[in-house]
Image (cartoon, rainbow, N blue to C red):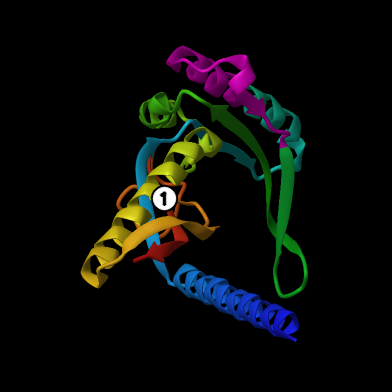
Amino acid sequence: MKSNSAGLFFLGLFVAAGVAAGGYFVGQTMYNAKVALNTAEAKGLAERRVKANVANWSISFTNEDESEADIRGLYEESKSDQQTIIKKLKEIGFTDDEIQIGALEYFNQEYRDNNQQVVDESHRLEGTIGIETSNVDIVGKARAQLNELIAEGINLRSYAPRYSFTNLNDIKPDMLKEATKNARIAANEFAENAGVTVGGIRSARQGSFFIRDAGQEYGDTAKIEKDVRVVTTITFYLTE
């Protein structure tokens, strides 16, 4: 009987010890899980001032006559103006690959009196020339020089150029790295006030990249200088 009693005693002791140990590990697991759920969300901003690398510029020119019989002469005059404009563009520094010549378009209009008799008419040829160049710095100068042709009798119109930045992929990695660093700085400031320490990243959301004309809230094609901006939202673990 004594032998059986001793066996039962030690068996109960081992069971109690096992329950106590299990309770400890369960408690530690719950504690660690609770600490791991303590997080801080912070936003990180990165900005760059960049220069446009592509410019698109359009030019139109018009010739008009009142007589249908002079359409042939109107066409020859338009072709001459076209060649004069192209020659000027090449003198400024644009290449054949950068110059796109549009088709000549014909428009006519008749003006009638109350009896529906034609009292006047107009015949117009309109041509376009487009420029796409990576030499963005000469576009402004070219617009000024091209206006000199107006004094020679060419009826032309120079539209505002559009400046674009297309090298975003080249600066994305560094900007995201900077934004993440700035988010951690913001999280560290919060953690310091709360008496905790910033740990690893739990989750991260990358915001969209925005390109705007330098110093402007809206628009991204009017200026050569651009501002690129991205904001990341990162959730960090906090530890005691």
Which image quarter holds the N terminus? bottom right
Q: Position of residue 88 (x, y in %)?
A: 48, 18
Q: Give the side of residue 135 with respect to residue 82, left or right.
A: left
Q: Give the side of residue 112 with respect to residue 63, left or right.
A: right
Q: Position of residue 7 (x, y in %)?
A: 71, 78
Identify the image quadrant of residue 237: bottom left
Which image quarter holds the C terminus? bottom left
User: Residue, x 30% and y 52% (percent of image)?
Assistant: 215
Q: Main secondary structure of the magenta part?
A: helix
> Which residue has dot 1 on it?
180
Q: Give the range drawn in magenta.
A: 81-104
Query: Quick check: 28 above or below 50?
Result: below
- The answer, for residue 164, to whether it is visible in the render is no
What amino acid type should be assigned to the residue bearing mark 1?
Answer: Thr
Identify the image quadrant of residue 49: top left
User: Residue, x 43% and y 32% (percent of image)?
Assistant: 150
Q: Position of residue 142 (x, y in %)?
A: 41, 26
**Nearer to me, 220 or 150:** 220
User: Residue, x 75% and y 29% (percent of image)?
Assistant: 72
Q: Give the side of residue 206 with respect to residue 139, left or right.
A: right
User: Residue, x 36% and y 30% (percent of image)?
Assistant: 144
Query: Quick check: 171 above or below 176?
Result: above
**Nearer to me, 183 or 95:** 183
**Nearer to me, 205 or 231:** 205
Q: Give the side of residue 115 with respect to residue 32, left or right.
A: right
Q: Position of residue 154 (x, y in %)?
A: 50, 31
- The answer, for residue 198, to whether it is visible in the render is yes
